[in-house]
Amino acid sequence: MSGRTPQERSWVEIQWRKLRNPPPPVLRAVLGNLAIAAVGGLLLFIYATLNPTADLAPLVVLFILVVIVAGLLASALGRRFSPAGALKMGEE
């Protein structure tokens, strides 16, 4: 050890490092949400185009719930079955 104190980073630099190196559970949840949102949004768009008089409000609520649950499942299942996640589960 050289005895130097580490350089203090700015808030922007810290956030940029977090963005470049996200934790795997966060990355899985975000990508899971993004994939489900893209597919669901496309399906809602197609349905609205084919049936312009349809009431989309219940479908939009269902769509939002599915995206949230998909992110939760992607995060939870990934944590439970990955080797790193298995170690963390035993420590809690």
Image (spheres, rainbow, N blue to C red):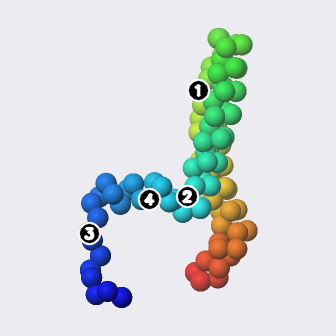
Q: Which residue of the protein is positioned furthest toward the front in this rendering? A: 2
Residue 59 spot, x, y in % from top left:
64, 30
Secondary element at tag 3? loop
Residue at image point 73% right, 68% down: 81
Task: Name the N-terminal-most of marks 3 and 4.
Answer: 3
Q: Is residue 21 above or below residue 55?
A: below
As measured in the structure, the alpha-carbon distance from the residue carrying label 2 to the one carrying label 3 is 25 Å
Task: Name the N-terminal-most of marks 2 and 1.
Answer: 2
Residue 74 spot, x, y in % from top left:
66, 55
Snapshot quadrant of residue 46: top right
Q: Residues within 10 Å of mark 1 (few under 14, many from 20)?
A: few
Q: Is residue 13 above or below residue 47?
A: below
Task: Name the N-terminal-most of marks 1 and 4.
Answer: 4
Secondary element at tag 2? helix
As measured in the structure, the alpha-carbon distance from the residue carrying label 2 to the one carrying label 1 is 29 Å
As measured in the structure, the alpha-carbon distance from the residue carrying label 3 to the one carrying label 1 is 49 Å
Which tag is nearer the camera, tag 2 or tag 3? 3
Secondary element at tag 1? helix
What kind of residue is marked 2?
A: Val
- Image quarter (top left, top right, bottom left or bottom right) of the N terminus: bottom left
Q: Is residue 27 above or below residue 92?
A: above
What kind of residue is marked 1?
A: Ala
Residue tagged by mark 1? 57
Q: Nearer the viewer, residue 41 or 84?
A: 84
Secondary element at tag 4? helix
Q: Nearer the viewer, residue 76 or 34?
A: 34
Residue 18, which numbered label?
4
What kind of residue is marked 4?
A: Lys
Residue 26, which numbered label?
2
Q: Residues within 10 Å of mark 4 (few under 14, many from 20)?
A: few
Q: Residues within 10 Å of mark 3 (few under 14, many from 20)?
A: few
